[in-house]
Amino acid sequence: MYSVFPFEKIDFVIDKASEILCREKKFTMELFPYSEFQGFDILDVSNAMKLKIAEMFVNKTEIMRIKAFAENCDVSLEMLIRDRLAPDEVVMKQSTIDHNDFKESILFTIEVTKNNDDWEWNKLFKKREGVSTFFSYCKNVDSINLSYFWNKVYHKLID
């Protein structure tokens, strides 16, 4: 059975995603291993972002700030899954290539990523609800009654 994302890990997962997105690549096509998330997967990253949105509603954050955060989360997740993250074994193989040889580096990366839709996280990513969609859901749930609100939020995450 699917377990709900641990609330106390929200900031760790979001900070890790941000750090990977901001990290300067050593070479153009550098990928980073899934293991950097220490056992969390792309659905956990998405759920952490969704819980942060729910928390923003509870804290009465301005609606436009929440919406902007949600939209940025969707873009960030897309960038992570398409441009930054790969299975650890792919990253290990990539580390054996001479990245000073730009052509070899590009050809290798194209070869190993051509089937990236088959990678575990990419499959999970396709199944998830977008963060912006979750924002719209939360916007329509009464956040004054906290017990009701959090019950709806967690039920939405595990559906």
Image: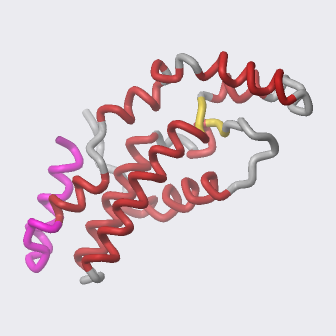
- Count of numbered labels shown in the rendering: 0
The spot of residue 116 in percent (x, y) is 52, 23
| Colouring style | secondary structure
| In magenta segment, residue 129 | no
- Image spot of residue 86 (x, y percent): 60, 31
Q: Position of 135 compared to 120: left or right?
A: left
The picture places residue 94, in percent across and down from the top left corner, at: 76, 26
Would you place residue 120 above or below residue 31 in this image? above
Q: Where does the image place residue 15, in percent across and percent down from the top left? A: 55, 62
Quick one: 15 or 101, which is closer to the camera?
101
Q: Give the dominant element type of the magenta stretch: helix, strand or loop.
A: helix
In the displayed structure image, the side of residue 6 where residue 149 appears, left or right: left
Report the side of 71 relative to 144 (left or right): right
Q: Is residue 77 above or below residue 35?
A: below
Residue 101 sits above or below residue 27 on the image:
above
Magenta residue span: 139-159
**Side of 47 relative to 38 (left or right):** left
Residue sitting at x 42%, y 60%: 72
Residue displayed at 9% across by 66% down: 140
Q: Is residue 142 magenta?
A: yes
